[in-house]
Amino acid sequence: MPETRVILKNCGVVDPLSIDSYIENDGFVGLDKALKMSPTDVIEEIKKSGLRGRGGAGFPTGLKWDMTGKAPGDEKYVLCNADEGEVGTFKDRYIIENDPFSLVEGVAIASYAVGAKKAFIYLRAEYNYLLEKLNNAIEQTRKKGYLQSAGVDIEVFEGAGAYICGEESALIESIEGKRGEVRYRPPFPPTEGLWRKPTVIDNVETLMNAPRIMANGADWYSQMGVDRSKGTKVFSICGDVDKPGVYELVMGTPLRELVENLAQAKDIKMVQIGGASGRVVPYENIDTALSFETVLGAGGVMVFNQNRDVIEIIRMNMAFFEEESCGKCFPCREGTKRLLEIVTRFADGKAYERDLKALEDLSETMMLTSLCGLGQAAPNSLVDTIKYYRSEYESRIM
């Protein structure tokens, strides 16, 4: 099954430095159509398309825009989360590098729909080399009058390298000049976000869908995909594969198509989908459909062959989360430390019999009680590997 390039259609075709090249390839057709509609009708079109957030949570995009648009007050914001910090994930970087104008157009459509006069693109610190390219796209779009027509101005905000700022409330804190920590919720950003004003926060890929939907129609978009997973999904794939890279597939495509046919992986032991916080799929489940209803995550896929030590992979994951926890809530702050300590004992072959149950109990506590998605998702790969590779843990018990 070949790729279906909707989000990636301009990559390698359009000059990312030239707005004229973008316009020649149907650039701003979606925004032009949106501006001829009322903001309410734009939101209804997004709702009808079935678009859901591509950052991992899968919240309905149209509903989020609707909540923000209907929230009281004239001061509203749109934030593009380009803080792509998940381990092994690089598809947003590829998109911005090759098609920045589509992102700017998507931000403009979202801003028009919800009535935001100011929008920010929050760029990951490690992607600072993309700053000039993004600013060039924004400035050329401004000079052509598209931003003025949408009633918005866009600014790029550079992050400072904290993984936690990929979480939406910590991202808001960072833009406000505070330490990157999660907020207690409710209230949620659509009603009280940046500077306590109604705010839409969507990631790069989500916003890139908006111009495609507005240009081609919700019916066209919703015909792709399965069940409640509509459209396409962009994946970055790395690890033990012959052809690492960025690929785009219709929702519901079997994982095997991505891993074996496109990336040409061989002798697969397991696949981790969604970065270090994602789920683990053993090879016997390689035909799992890629959708919100099964496994998806933010789009980062890592493949591990039969020579890889499962427990060492998990130890590295736990070390990452122990380092990146913001420390605000007790379950995550202390839980990530304890998980790393216990998994390290397994990695060293010095685990106690009680340690396996301790890992399971602590993981459950973190998933149920952590304040944000970092602590809630940190044990995912650990829990899955205990389920599918329990014997490897048991063999390390003294």
Image: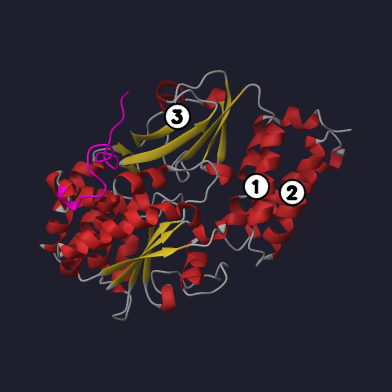
**Of the image marks 2 and 1, the number of the one nearer the N terminus:** 2
Q: What kind of element bears circle 3?
A: helix
**Of the image marks 3 and 1, the number of the one nearer the N terminus:** 3
Q: Is the magenta stretch mostly helix, strand or loop?
A: loop
Residue behind mark 1:
379
Q: Reply above or below: 37 against 304.
A: below
Residue behind mark 2:
339
Q: Is residue 29 left or right of residue 108?
A: left
- Residue contact at pointers 2 and 1, CB within 8 angstroms: yes
Residue at x-position 68% and y-position 50%: 364
- Image coords of residue 133 (percent x, y): 32, 53
Residue at x-position 36% and y-position 40%: 233
Q: Of 389 and 318, which appears nearest the observer?
A: 318
- Image coords of residue 127 (percent x, y): 45, 52
Q: Is residue 69 left or right of residue 376?
A: left
Numbered label attached to residue 255:
3
